[in-house]
Image: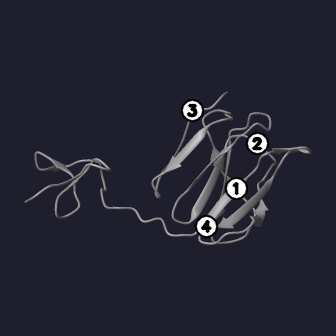
Amino acid sequence: MALEINHETNDIVNSTGEIKVNGTAVGGDNSPVTIIGSRGIIGGGIGSSGHQNVIQYITIATTGNSQDFADLTTGTGQLAGLHGTGRGVFGGGTNSKTNVMQYITVSTLSNAADFGDLNQPLFNLCACSNGSRGIFAGGDA
């Protein structure tokens, strides 16, 4: 069995798409994740009238201005957002240093709903996702 090494992505795969060390698969499911969609989401912010609850979207494949998507559960700024294959999640923010996470269904224009809580209230945090799992990290407490 041959290994393929991609020096650009530092991926090592065999013909089945698995990564193995001494014959044992490592890293869980190593199959490629395809994130489907062409919508970019922007939420919250701090404007001249205070914390904003507006969610806007853009269609990435076209040029043009953003359009109204819906509203966050509360106005907040300096929050982080991530996206999976169908759901977007916003977390944290400066409105009383919140620990709230709220989610949207990216394909449906509708208001955000409660998703749960971060371990502690944070703002200026960052987020990332691989399409199935998301991580909120860093930030100011």
For label 3, count other residues whose C-alpha is less than 10 Å away and answer few (under 14), some (14-19) or many (20+): few
Could you tell whether 37 is left or right of 15 in the image?
right
Is residue 22 or residue 34 the one in the foreground? 34
Is residue 24 or residue 43 the one in the foreground? 43
Q: What residue is shown with label 3?
A: 138
For label 1, count other residues whose C-alpha is less than 10 Å away and answer few (under 14), some (14-19) or many (20+): some
| Residue 139 x, y percent position in the rendering | 62, 32
Q: Residue at x 11, y 50 (%)?
A: 23
Mark nearer the viewer, 1 or 3: 1
| Residue 96 x, y percent position in the rendering | 79, 34
Q: Residue furthest right?
A: 49
Q: What's under tag 1, amino acid-wise?
A: Ile
Above or below residue 81? Residue 87 is below
Upstream in sequence: badge 3 or badge 2? 2
**Alpha carbon distance from label 3 to label 2:** 16 Å
Q: What's under tag 2, amino acid-wise?
A: Gly
Q: What's under tag 4, amino acid-wise?
A: Ile
For label 2, count other residues whose C-alpha is less than 10 Å away and answer few (under 14), some (14-19) or many (20+): many
Q: Tell me, for residue 2, which label it has, or none.
A: none
Q: Residue furthest front?
A: 63
Q: What residue is shown with label 1?
A: 42
Q: What's under tag 3, amino acid-wise?
A: Gly
Could you tell whether 72 is left or right of 137 in the image?
right
Q: Residue at x 47, y 65 (%)?
A: 35
For label 4, count other residues whose C-alpha is less than 10 Å away and answer few (under 14), some (14-19) or many (20+): few
Q: What residue is shown with label 4?
A: 60
Q: What residue is shown with label 2?
A: 77
